[in-house]
Image (spheres, rainbow, N blue to C red):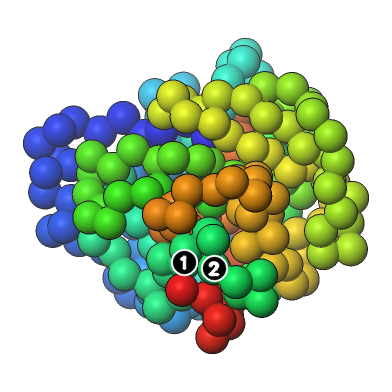
Amino acid sequence: MRLTKIPVVLLALASAVSLISGATAASSSPNAKIPIFDKDSYLFNNKWGGNSGLQTIRDQNGEGHLEWAWGNSATSVQGYPSVVRGWHWDTPGFKTHTLPIAVTSPKACSLRSTLKYKLKASGAYDAAYDLWTATGRNLSWQTKPSLEVMVWGEHERVNPAGSPTGTATIGGHNWTVWRGTGPFGGPVVSFVAGSGALHGSLNLMQFVRTAAGPDADPNLRLISTEFGVEVTQGSGSATVQKWTQQRSRSCK
């Protein structure tokens, strides 16, 4: 996922970011945030494609609604309307009860993510989890992720960064594994399946462990999880009806 470019002065004020609230809260403003679900997550209008398209987030009777309308000429991702749990550049102090988790926790450690959503889209896009890791203990807007892990479900006319390097079987699905370089200069590992792969329950720690490998830095921690739609071209909407995460006791 491309990083949101935010003026330093705003980043310095990140801990004071205000979330829009209300039963019918909605916003089309870039970087707008609306609390959703158990209030340790929020809708994020992550948009960087300028004024060439429209992108909106909405709390729709307790469900997260994402909507977009972009043109058909872009060749790179224009936005990633999403639900965020944990750290992010412009909300580095945002807390969630399931994170962080040490990547080198015992194998019994799981982060069980249960997701239910509806997607209607045309153009070039991918519905995906975006998982961020870092070695630093003091998270801030200056935190540089050590590894980005993406988990793709439905997608059309787009490929992840890098190139395919193998396959993995996780959660009853076969995934093509792509490895490349992320926009932050570090590695990004993407697991690509297809329609239906993200619906239901997945242990996100399995993806992170596989991406990090057996020689992972003992200081590496999963600090953030996101789910949304990366949009390159076209229009559509997604309604996140449910997203819960359960951390097992063996996690450190």
Few, some or many C-alpha atoms within 10 Å of disc 2 (few <14, some 14-19, many ≥20)? some
Disc 2 designates what residue? 105
Residue contact between numbered discs 1 and 2, judged by CB atoms under 8 Å: yes
> What amino acid is labelled 1 in the image?
Ile
**Quarter of the rendering containing residue 241:** bottom right
Identify the element where label 1 is drawn.
strand
Identify the element where label 2 is drawn.
loop
> What amino acid is labelled 2 in the image?
Ser
Disc 1 designates what residue? 101
Left or right: residue 169 versus residue 37 is right
- Please state which of residues 102 and 237 is positioned toward the viewer in this rendering: 102
Residue at 53% x, 41% y: name it. 148
Query: Up-down: is 38 above or below 20?
Result: below
Can residue 215 be seen by looking at this rendering? yes
Residue at 11% x, 44% y: name it. 12
Left or right: residue 42 versus residue 236 is left
**Quarter of the rendering containing residue 149:** top right
Query: Up-down: is 201 above or below 91?
Result: below
